[in-house]
Image (tube, helix red, strand yellow):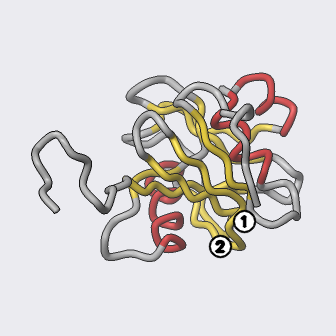
Amino acid sequence: MSNSTGDKPSTPLHSVSVAGAVIREDGRMLVIKRRDNGNWEPPGGVLELDETPQEGVVREVLEETGIRVEVEQLTGVYKNMARGIVALVFRCKPFCGKEHPTSEATAVEWLTPNEIKKDMSEIYAIRLLDALNSNPPQVRDHNGTHLNETRKHHN
């Protein structure tokens, strides 16, 4: 089968990112204000080739917030359909360290679930709110701005 330059490769290449839904004992959740775009998001970033998803979460949360976490479980898989990015989100608990602004975050805050619903964009808020459920991981897709809830999902 020929693969001219216009064809998609037979194996699509997705970018994979990881994020931590870090929940404190009082129920507040760790969020960062990104230095590059000013968005409030869960701490996270691109998964390196030589690390497991759990190692990536620990590294990213520490780099972006100063908090070392213990990874508990996968709570959601989110695909940005517009950019081909798959994000794996893990519920974590803070282990040690003190939150502080970093080279990637102008602010690091502990927000309540209500503040998250009010202050964060839908596609990032849902990643944190899904982690509060004890159900199996959620699998959702979005267009970079809003969840694609109208798509039919077949079991």
- Name the residue that disc number 2 marks: 70
Q: Which of 143 and 63 is in front in this view?
A: 143
Q: Position of residue 89 (x, y in %)?
A: 62, 57
Picture residue at 50% right of the left edge, 70% below the top: 53
Please rate how many residues cluster around mark 2, counting C-alpha atoms within 10 Å: few if below 14, some from 14 to 19, many from 20.
some
Label 2 secondary element:
strand
For residue 46, side relative to residue 90 (left or right): left
For residue 30, side relative to residue 133 (left or right): left
- Name the residue that disc number 1 marks: 93
- Locate the N terminus and report the quarter of the image it occupies: bottom left
Q: Where is residue 64 in the image (x, y as percent from the top left)?
A: 47, 49
Q: Position of residue 120 (x, y in %)?
A: 68, 27
Are dots 2 and 1 in contact, CB under 8 Å?
yes
For residue 94, side relative to residue 15 (left or right): right
Position of residue 17 relative to residue 39, above or below, is below
Label 1 secondary element:
strand
